[in-house]
Amino acid sequence: MLWSIIKIVVFIALVAGAAYGAGYLLELEGGVRIVMAGVEINMTPLTALIALVLLVVAIWLLMKLAALLVAVLRFINGDETAISRHFAQHRQEKGYNALSEGLLALASGEGAEAMTKARRAEKFLHKPALTNLIAAQGAEISGDRRKAEEIYKRLLKNEKTRFVGVRGIMRQKLSEGDTDTALRLAQTAFSIKPRHKEVQDTLLRLQAQKEDWAGARETLNAKLKYGNMPRDLHRRRDAVLALSEAREVLEDGQHIEAREAAIEANRLSPDLVPAAVLAARSYIEKGSKRYATRVVRKAWEAQPHPDLAAVFAEIEPDETPDDRLKRFAKLLKIHPDHRETRLVETELHIAAEDFPGARRALGDLAETDPDARALTLMAAIERGEGASDAVVEGWLARALSAPRGPQWVCEKCHHIHAEWQPVCENCEAFDTLSWTSPPPMSFSSATGVEVLPLIVGSLEDKSEEDADADAAVVDAEIVTDSAEDEQAPKAEK
């Protein structure tokens, strides 16, 4: 409605301007005099202007007629396509003008205008490979998915535009959430253009989501072959896929194949913690304790992790707490100041009932970097050293509201996972999980865990209290007994 009003106003303004100009020319004095070959022609200003316009039109018509005359003469001389080429050239000019306007409309985000120009260009050019592509993208911009898919299907009929059609429909299915169809289309597009980076990434992501680990490894090798992935990243992700394949084989009960796959995954990426854990357990099953120790030590050098400490304890399951503390000493020397090293050493001292040694190992972690694990260990130390129930309960209460510490967090969507997965269970991104502390979540509640220390007791209060003593003893015993029974460091309490 607004656009129609604007066009009417512009038209009226042009008519008014033309009328004003004509009146002005009529009122002008003088005129134009042309003298040629003894002939004199006098014209008023308005007549001169009209004559000039007619002259320009006549020259344009003469040029067109001259071009047509040249085409007719060529036809008479034996060029049978001269006249048809003359008219075809004119049609091409119109068609390419419409095509360029359609591209400009796409760049401006005007989907409907782009579709209109594409239809006009097709009328003059008869080049569906170009016009259908513009029309399909215009339909996508306009939100007409059905029309876009219909046009992409037309492109499938031409071998030159088949890839564009397959890729377009694949993107449509992905936006609709039809990943099964999108996977088949991605495989088809990959077979047509295996070098295409976007198709490679899409196919790899869909194969990982469908747990087609063997197919994903083939796609990953293609990315390396065609230079779309650095070699170090390829080794890392190939290890992730090999590890996923090993876990799947292990679930099927094929222990020997799973063992070999786990060792292969660890060989490809020794710093991948889940691969190192699975490979170490495979060596333990084979009785190769020395190789298991080597795998854990190499992974620990890259990143200390509670799962590595746990599998290191499994190498000698029957050793005493003191012997375990001595055996762990070589591992703990690799990163002596690392937070995980200090926590593991604290747990080992608690298991050996060396509570002063546990306090020295823990240091000031409970104050400078408190999480549920450090605070729970502090409660166990206090209980082991004979502190009052109120003090133990105070530490446990703080542990309830403290962050859990490092966890498997997706780098893309920050979703927290209970255990490592090759694909994020929230955003379905591939190989995005890292062992890190999630962002803290602040909350406040008058009846929540923040007021528990005020209810159960103060950390500085060393006096003996009888109220709720049984509950405090049970809580402390849970911590101590867990450390003694497990005989190994754990990732979570």
Image (cartoon, rainbow, N blue to C red):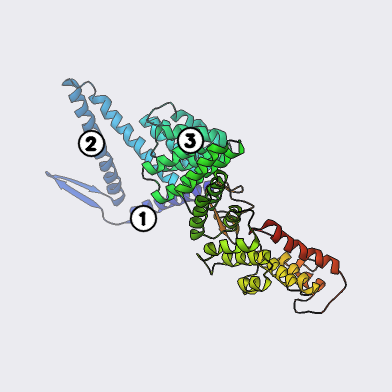
Q: Which amino acid does label 2 sit on?
A: Met
Residue 451 visible in the picture:
no
Rendered location of residue 175, percent (x, y): 56, 41
Rendered location of residue 343, percent (x, y): 61, 66
Residue at (47, 41) in percent of width and height: 113
Is 126 situated above or below 352? above
Considering the numbered disc 2 on the image, is that residue within a helix, a strand or a loop?
A: helix
Q: Earlier in the sequence, mark 3 or mark 2?
A: 2
Q: Which amino acid does label 1 sit on?
A: Tyr
Q: Which residue matches tag 1? A: 24
Residue, far left: 37
Residue placed most toward the observer, 392 or 347: 347
Residue placed most toward the observer, 113 or 72: 113
Numbered badge on residue 146: none
Q: Distance between the residues labelled 2 and 1?
A: 33 Å
State the image quarter where residue 320 is shown.
Answer: bottom right
